[in-house]
Amino acid sequence: MRATVDLSDTAMGRTWVWREYDEEGLRFTLLLAQHELRDLAVRLAALRAADGPPVTQAERILGQYHRAYRDLTGALAGVGDRDLDRAPAKDQWPVRAVIEHMLGAEYGFLGVVQYARASDRPRDDDEAGERYPSWRTEYGYRAPETVAGGIADIRNALFEIHRRVLRELADVGDDELERPALFWDGAKPVRFRMHRFEAHLVQHAIQVDKTLVAIGCGPTEAHRLIRVLYRDLADVEVLGSSAFGESERRAVASALSERAKEISSLP
């Protein structure tokens, strides 16, 4: 997908033909990829329903969260190292600061949920509140205060905590979702805490969008379409399993890879 993210709006109109489709230009490569990803998601969902285990509520919540994460990675697809520290205005956060704030929330939300589930959490809420800061540090639920480096380092930091959230919360049972989880806003059920992952990403992805526009890095047509692809990739990834759909996933991945090579080789 990154093979096309830097294409100009003019380049998107260059001639590109796929079977009977010869009028849409190069943009049709991305529109076709989106079509294929959506169809693959439908096929995988059908295979999961027929042969896989039932989908839990936690899996559905994490699927929504993963979609928001992929949308954010799409928003960052065209961002360069030089864009990370350009503040849109005095006293406003540059992209790096927004991401660092998001990372802090991701670690914080995960720690709160896992503390509510922990076997060593004191039963008394006052004792639990006193114990939490040291417990959070002990088990690694504190985000790094800063993320140095370029956009690749930013992406990696987001990926690592996102992967950890998906891995650690994958086994949350339906019976755990109403368990109270204490945070600065008092006791809220685990269900609420898990939905906060997605809601917070959506909120600050919008902030990233506004920041990029303000510093002169608003999205091109190619970038808008790439972001749609990242978002739609999420549904395929959530349904990923070695137990079903392997041939279907390989076929689509091969088609997308070959098309990306073709675009990259264009003069």
Image: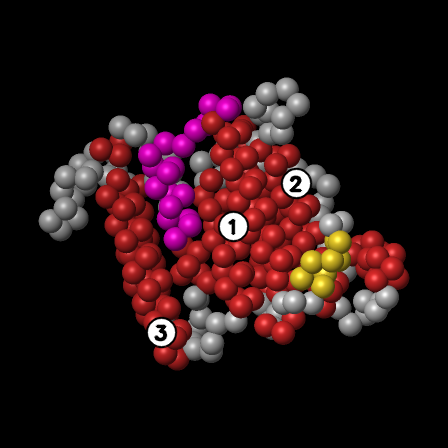
Alpha carbons under labels 2 and 3: distance apart: 38 Å
The residue singled out by tag 3 in the image is: 47
Q: Residue at x 55, y 41 (%)?
A: 203
Kindly identify the amino acid type of the residue bearing the numbered disc 2.
His
Q: Neighbour class for label 3 at 10 Å: few (<14), some, many (≥20)? A: some
- Boundaries of the magenta span: 214-232
SS of the residue under disc 2:
helix
Main secondary structure found in the magenta portion:
helix
Q: Quadrant of residue 81?
A: top right
* Residue that appears at 66% across and 62% down: 190
Whether 227 is among the magenta residues is yes
Give how far across and how far down residue 20 sits, in percent: 11, 49
The residues tagged by marks 1 and 3 sit, at their Cα atoms, a distance apart of: 25 Å
Q: Residue at x 49, y 39 (%)?
A: 76
**What residue appears at the point 43 percent right and 66 percent down from the top-left corner?**
239
Q: Which mark is residue 69?
A: 1
Tell me the quarter of the picture where residue 29 sits.
top left
Three-letter code for the amino acid on which mark 3 is drawn: Leu
